[in-house]
Image: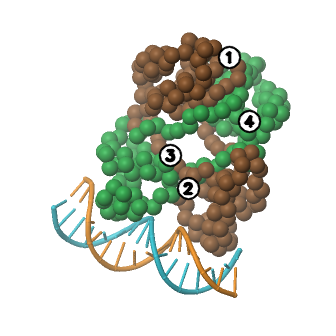
Chain colours: A green, B brown, C cyan, D orange
Amino acid sequence: MKSDNEKVKIDGIDKKILRFLMDDARKPVLEIARNIGISGAAIHQRLRKLEASGLLAGSKFIINPKIMGYTTMAYIGIYLDKAMSNPIAVKQLEKIPEVLECHYTTGNWSILIKVLCRDNEHLMQVLNKEIQQIEGVSRTETFISLAQQIDRQITI
Amino acid sequence: MKSDNEKVKIDGIDKKILRFLMDDARKPVLEIARNIGISGAAIHQRLRKLEASGLLAGSKFIINPKIMGYTTMAYIGIYLDKAMSNPIAVKQLEKIPEVLECHYTTGNWSILIKVLCRDNEHLMQVLNKEIQQIEGVSRTETFISLAQQIDRQITI
DNA sequence: CTTGAAATAATAGAGAA
DNA sequence: TTCTCTATTATTTCAAG
């Protein structure tokens, strides 16, 4: 694994491989091989290299939260008291399963989080009974995502 | 595929399978089978059911943008003129590859987007030469993510 | 859900362009 | 180096119980 900020050079074949797998992590290597016209072993070797470079950070099954009854997504900007250190707050946020992302941000807030809840009532409970209860949280601003209209990774 | 808001019932075995695959989409079904003590074919059958239910929305290879030289992530709140319809703006945003997410939100802004850029200068260019140039965009507020401290999917 | 068989894929090693 | 070819092992997938 290279140091996290070191750029890696990838060629057109690498890009083709990555585009296939970013779209479907379970696509068989041999199928990709047939598509782009080199041997499966070559793809395999390239994938090992890409993995060693740190560029490949694993793979995930994507599940549709709506089917599980989770239909309310929101961003919440959190103001922390000066005395409250960010890492301690993050540790508390980690314990709340509805918190999917947490960013240490410039601007108004100390922290910006993304939460996923079943409905607005559930969101209200998470806000009042979980997030507001964290010591050092002084105020929050909530933005409900009525629709997520774009969702993608970096373009290769 | 069930209608998008219909809940699906999954049992403990489904949950175990999903937890494995949400963490590593390429984990062999037989390996999961050995882990949880049922046959590979049973897992296969369950996965087909979960896929048919719409709960499984595919799989993705995750790539580490830092290794590609993309180190600046930011959220941008966008104010739209009343005359500007959201779908038209979204169509323009889709053309900007640095825009990874786009949410139609309640609250101050009409739109909240997530962008990924190489550095702050690149972010500035995307802001000034791409986003601000979209017709109907009156003002923006940018929040740079200094660190993403949590990043996960819904807990099963 | 299981078994068992057939088709397909992953992977390692040797050697050529 | 990066590829191809080949052989071995492992996995996927299907049909039947």
> Mark 1 falls within which chain?
B
Secondary structure beneath dot 2 equals loop
* Gap in angstroms between the C-alphas marked 2 and 4: 26 Å
Task: Kindly report the distance in space between the C-alpha atoms of the residues bearing marks 1 and 3.
Answer: 32 Å
Asked whether the residues under marks 1 and 3 belong to the same chain, the reply is yes
Chain letter of the residue carrying label 4 = A
- Badge 3: how crowded within 10 Å, few (<14), some, or many (20+)? some
Gap in angstroms between the C-alphas marked 4 and 1: 18 Å
Q: Quadrant of the N terminus of chain B?
A: bottom right
Q: Give the side of residue A61 with respect to residue A17, left or right.
A: right
In the rendered image, residues at marks 2 and 3 fall on the same chain: yes
Please give the residue where the numbered disc 2 appears in the rendered image: B25
Q: Residues within 10 Å of mark 2 (few under 14, many from 20)?
A: many
Q: Nearer the viewer, mark 1 or mark 3?
A: 1
Considering only order in the chain, which callout, 1 or 2, is on the residue closer to the N terminus? Answer: 2
Amino acid of disc 4: Thr
Q: Which mark is residue B62?
A: 3
Task: Tell me where residue A108 appears, x and y as whole percent.
Answer: 64, 15
Whether residue B19 is visible: no
- In this picture, is A12 found above or below C5? above
- The residue at which mark 4 appears reads as A72
B48 sits left or right of A125 in the view: left
Under mark 1, the amino acid is Asn
Residue B108 badge:
1
Tags 4 and 1 both on a single chain: no
